[in-house]
Image (tube, grey):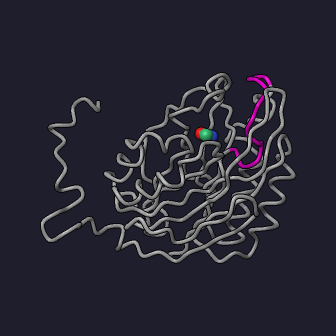
Amino acid sequence: MRIGYYQYCPEFGAPAQNLEKVQDTLAGVNADLIVLPELAFTGYFFEDRKELKTLAEDVSDSQTVIRLSKFCRDNDFHLVVGFAERQRDKLYNSALVIGPSGLIHTYRKLHLFNTEKEYFDPGNTPLEIVKIRGAKLGVMICFDWVFPEVARVLALQGADVLCHPSNLVLKHCQKAMITRSLENSVYSVTANRTGKEIRPRGELSFTGNSQIVGPKGDIMAQSNSEEDQVVVQTIDLAIARDKAITENNDLFGDRRPEFYNPLV
Ligand code: ACM
């Protein structure tokens, strides 16, 4: 199975232009799955809920989803894309899994970061596994990395690969995702964006350094902080599914959930 990411700098408020860039770059790429950044088509730093509303789309009649579905069909791959989602009067920071058959899954970000709380509604979708081509995917978005419960819940349900669209502005995520992979024995793909947004509320710089991490915590690929880059790696699902640590230790079998009550 071949999984990867596309790191780039979306132009704020220009979804058609960003979609064209994604299609121009990814056409013909040999992969089963490619992860794009959080809010991959709209940009990130909205002025307010009103501005977000003008850019968010309902997945049931979204031109972006229609075009991406055809794009996946034409290229025989799957995409995980960050997406500004509107559903009736609600607005979600979502990630969509799209394949040759169309939209497969929607995840709505559970842990909103900073000013996102002012214009997005908190996510309300369960943490579920998405099956594609024999692989089990778990989807999380950016700031979800600070909450190890997210990766754990996905791993306990059998995730082989954590797909992690991101617009990172804090320093430590890429390092933390090494631990998320290691402590759950899963692959992780953090697809971060690059560049800066200078907007009415201020300026944000995004950290790039997108990466693919293996189940033993090894960095299989990492981009720099600035450049556009497509990276694809071949992975072995059997490695993620082997939860043995030593002959006497099993990552999940050794858990003591009867002592974890304060967690819930
Ligand atoms: C973030 O969650 N976009 C930092």
Please say if 41 is above or below 1.
above
In the rendered image, the quadrant that contains the C terminus is top left
Of residues 72 and 236, the one nearer the viewer is 236
Q: Residue furthest front?
A: 171
Ligand 1: give its quadrant. Answer: top right
Q: Main secondary structure of the magenta part?
A: loop
The quarter holding residue 36 reads bottom right
Number of callouts: 0
Compared across the picture, whether 43 is left or right of 95 comes to right
**How far from the left and from the top, in percent, is residue 178?**
45, 58
In this view, the residue in front, 89 or 247, is 247
Q: Is residue 42 magenta?
A: yes
In the rendered structure, the answer to whether residue 159 lies left or right of residue 169 reads: left
Which residue is rendered at x = 65% and y = 43% of the image? 169
Q: Answer yes or no: is residue 101 visible.
A: no
Q: Residue at x 35, y 62 (%)?
A: 185
Image location (x, y in percent) of residue 181: 41, 59
On screen, 43 above or below 183?
above
Q: Using the image as rendered, state which of residue 127 and residue 100 is in the foreground.
A: 127
Q: Residue at horizontal 46%, vertical 53%? A: 138
Q: Position of residue 28 (x, y in %)?
A: 73, 76
Residue 152 image offset from top left, x and y in percent: 35, 48
Start-end of magenta stretch: 39-50
Does the magenta portion include 14?
Answer: no
Can residue 134 be seen from the camera position used here? yes
Between residues 110 and 247, which one lies in front from this camera angle? 247
